């Protein structure tokens, strides 16, 4: 489905990574709010070769696999240029996103887009 980030900056579409795949991925499919000319770029990526790529269209959640009522996989934050372990769960029209790097975790709550 489609989810609006908690900071209202983007819409993320979560769907199978490839046709027929059990693993799901989340991709930035729409940027919200004013954008600079040329769009937002992945300027904080640790890989300097990727810093000029547009953020719109990049995959920020990878290889999400279902484990009970949760999905686990890998994530990437273009704002921080950091990879993290991701755990997702739904609660009505909310998607709880937990991202952890080592022992440091952050919880976000995204809203379903109808």
Image (cartoon, rainbow, N blue to C red):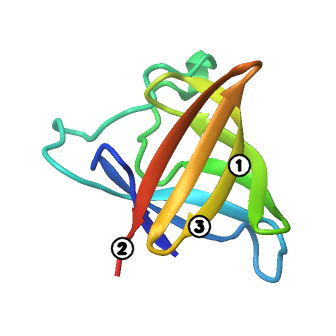
Q: Distance between the residues labelled 2 and 3?
A: 13 Å
Q: Distance between the residues labelled 1 and 2?
A: 20 Å
Instruction: Measuring from the top left, give residue 109's x and y in whole percent.
Output: 45, 51
Q: Residue at x 48, y 43 (%)?
A: 108
Of callouts 2 and 3, the N-terminal one: 3
**Residue 87: which numbered mark, if any?**
1
**Element carrying mark 1:** strand
The image shows residue 58, relative to residue 71, as above or below, that is above
- Between 109 and 37, the one nearer to me in the picture: 109
Of callouts 1 and 2, the N-terminal one: 1
Q: In which quarter of the image is residue 99?
A: top right
**Residue 23: which numbered mark, if any?**
none
Q: Which residue is drawn at 71% across and 49% down?
A: 87
Name of the residue lying farthest toward the front: 91
Q: Which residue is drawn at 49% across and 24% down?
A: 51
Residue beneath label 2, please?
A: 113
**Residue 90: which numbered mark, if any?**
3
Q: Distance between the residues labelled 3 and 1?
A: 11 Å
- Between 65 and 68, the one nearer to me in the picture: 68
Instruction: Measuring from the top left, give residue 68's x and y in whole percent.
Output: 85, 68
Q: In which quarter of the image is residue 86?
A: top right
Foreground mark, 1 or 2, reads: 1
The image shows residue 105, relative to residue 13, as above or below, that is above
Q: In which quarter of the image is residue 43?
A: top left
The image shows residue 101, relative to residue 21, as above or below, that is above
**Element carrying mark 3:** strand
Q: How crowded is mark 3: few (under 14 residues within 10 Å), some or many (20 or more)?
A: some
Foreground mark, 2 or 3, reads: 3
- Between 44 and 26, the one nearer to me in the picture: 26
């Amino acid at each position: 489905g489609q989810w609006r980030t908690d900071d209202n900056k983007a819409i993320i579409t979560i769907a199978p990574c490839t046709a027929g795949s059990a693993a799901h991925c989340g991709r930035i499919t729409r940027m919200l709010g004013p954008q600079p000319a040329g769009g937002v770029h992945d300027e904080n990526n640790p890989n300097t070769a990727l810093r000029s790529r547009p953020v719109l269209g990049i995959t920020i959640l990878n290889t999400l696999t279902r484990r009970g009522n949760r999905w686990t996989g890998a994530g990437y934050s273009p704002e921080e240029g950091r990879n993290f372990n991701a755990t997702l769960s739904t609660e009505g029209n909310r998607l709880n996103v937990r991202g952890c790097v080592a022992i440091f975790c952050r919880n976000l709550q995204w809203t379903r887009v109808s």
